[in-house]
Amino acid sequence: MEKLNRDPGSDPKSKTPTPRRGGPNALLLVGVLLIIGLLLFSQRSVKRSVIEDYYFFLDQIEQGKVQSVELHGSEDAYGTFKDPPPLEPEFDSSGKPVANRKPLEKHFLVRLLQTEAAQTDLNRLLKEHGVQTVPKRPSTETAMFVFWGIALALSAIMFGFIWVSMRRSREQMMGGGFLSGFSKSPAKRYEATQQSVLFKDVAGLEGVKDDLLEIVEYLREPEKFQRLGGRVPKGVLLMGPPGTGKTLLARAVAGEAGVPFYSVNGSEFIQMFVGVGASRVRDLFANAKDNAPAIIFIDEIDAVGRQRGAGLGGGHDEREQTLNQILSEMDGFAQTDSVIVLAATNRPDVLDPALLRPGRFDRHVTVGRPTQKGRVEIFQVHVRDVPLADDVDLNVLASGTIGLTGADIRNIVNESALWAARNDKNKVDMSDFEHARDKILMGAKREEVLTEEEKKKTAYHEAGHTIAAWLLPGADRVHKVTIIPRGRTLGATHTMPSEDKLSTSESELRDHLVVLLGGRAAEKLIYDETTAGAENDLERATSMARRMVTCWGMSERLGPVSYKLSDEDPFLGREMHQHRQFSEHTMELIDQEVTKILHHASSQASELLTAQRENLVKLTEALLKDEELGESAIAELIGPSVHAASNSNGRAKANGPLNPN
């Protein structure tokens, strides 16, 4: 992990410890409160019984029942019984015993006789019977006076300490002190010498790296561009799905340029105090300018950069104040300030237009999912330190991971290494990669025992999906089918495209719908009823059919018109006051067209499986026996698929026969 240096002017090699803020002051405050608590505890009142009969007191001394006596002058005495004696019966004037009399406490108070002879007799009696005599304490009035005097003095000291601390924090609010941490930038600073990530460590993104090389050259030699009047983009926005390497690219830019790199997450600007976000932005940009040339990287900038003027919260919302400060700082750069802002987001559609205009984030770089060549390069980077067996073919692995990101591939390599180590292997072979890929794409196996009937219904359901995908040219290639519970499902049919695709035709979408409804159609064909296991299939099919009608104009009745309804939440700032641009009648037509498309796909699935019922039963029986089948095993059962010709380049061997579980 890189060493962090939050102080722009400090030496990263310095070992000087940072003093802990407020340590002695906190101990002083705790000590004051502890003394006050002890004083209060010491003055707790003790329950005492008042003995009116002086001679009863003398009798208890003679009987040896008094433990100690504390004489307070010649008026009264405080004493303690060894054990509280029982009360003697007392009668009223009518001769009836007095009821509800309180028993004597262990501690008591007795009034003394005011004669010298009585005092002498008492002292003699106490001495004869070995009663402990406690020295006289100060009077109650004196003790209370001392107590309250000390309490008031300590309270004055405590409030004085608080007042001094608050005054000091106000004076140092923007430059250090008790509360200054709220206004300081939370960005982590990485020095040029700490950057170990270079462009050679970023694989599969050659086109994106070419766009960023210009930024690196500017940071290395800004005079070269300024001499000819050129202006490098002040901000570069990296857009793309999660896991594609946006943060890694930003670190590689800093590593190649050899300049300080300030990294911060967009959510770190926002705090509960008003104005803190804007203050942190100012502090971040001030530090970067003081150490120019430098790079500021704001990850997940959509946390503060969402569109203003709508959604929940008014114009004085803390997030909007922070965004306004970012806009001001980026627009206020002088041409000689060699500070470049990189930002990353996977939601560019919700960003404020002012943030995207030229002069701020004026260069937008899309970081997409890697191609076949890119995936091979990513595998090569991540298997550098992994000992591989001779049967591992990275080209085959790349062909079997279409649509995955760099983060997914790194996870596959790591899971395969862990699985090989768990099985006491010295090298990672192809079966380990297969296990890791299935675990990530289909979920981990669950240790659940299904009844024979549940297992059979699940097998028919998955066989229906498999046969539909096996025979329809527009569907994706079947990689594996299993009835072993994985993730949140009881079974799974894993398909993947035969090649990288950037668009999909209408016929391919309709074939996808048939595959999604194939499991339900198989249940209906065999059992004449359906189960709840098709819930996810129906959700995905309905969503796809609705997009076909409303977004892609694939309905003859409605024509080439977009009726897109955003799925964004209102608080994103887009949909609070935006109404749909079509009538209720059109909405009804959309529902009818979606239903029509789904019914047609369901009918196609039923017709296909009815014609292939023999293969459906054969595949189901094989699933019940082996629980998991690969592409080659399926081909041996029901013949080659329509995708076999396109797979003749060798990618099919990635899905060879699998050992039954």
Image (tube, rainbow, N blue to C red):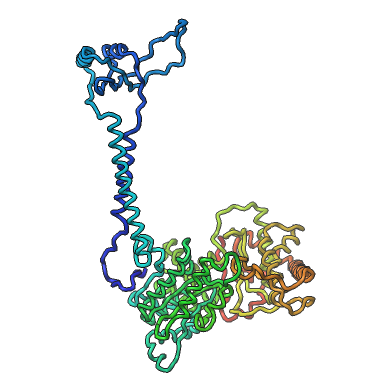
Image quadrant occupied by the C terminus:
bottom right
What residue occupies the far top of the structure in this picture? 95
- Residue 393 is at least partly visible in this image: no
Residue shown at the point (57%, 66%) measured from the top left: 314
- x, y (%) of residue 53? 33, 13
Judge left or right: residue 410 versus residue 60: right
- Looking at the image, which is closer to me, 439 or 123? 123
Q: Is residue 565 left or right of residue 183?
A: right
Q: Does residue 438 appear in the picture of this structure?
A: yes
Residue shown at 22% from the left, 26% from the top: 135
Instruction: Say which quarter of the image contains residue 18.
Output: bottom left
Name the foreground residue: 292 vs 128.
128
- Can you give x and y, in whole percent of width and height, for residue 357 in the image? 54, 81
Query: Is 627 positioned to the left or the right of 289 in the image?
Result: right
The N terminus is located in which quarter? bottom left
Q: Position of residue 426 (x, y in %)?
A: 40, 67
Residue, x 23% and y 24% (percent of image)?
Answer: 134
Depicted 308 relative to depicted 207: above or below: above
State the residue lying farthest toward the bottom: 228
Q: Nearer the viewer, residue 661 or 132?
A: 132
Quarter where residue 261 is shown: bottom left
Residue 227 against residue 510 in the figure, above or below: below
Position of residue 617 measured from the top left corner of the image (x, y, whole percent): 70, 63
**For residue 73, which quarter of the picture?**
top left
Query: What residue is rendered at 52% in x and 73% in y?
Result: 345
Count of numbered circles on the image? 0
Decide: is 648 above or below 104. Answer: below
Query: Is 196 positioned to the left or the right of 499 in the image?
Result: left
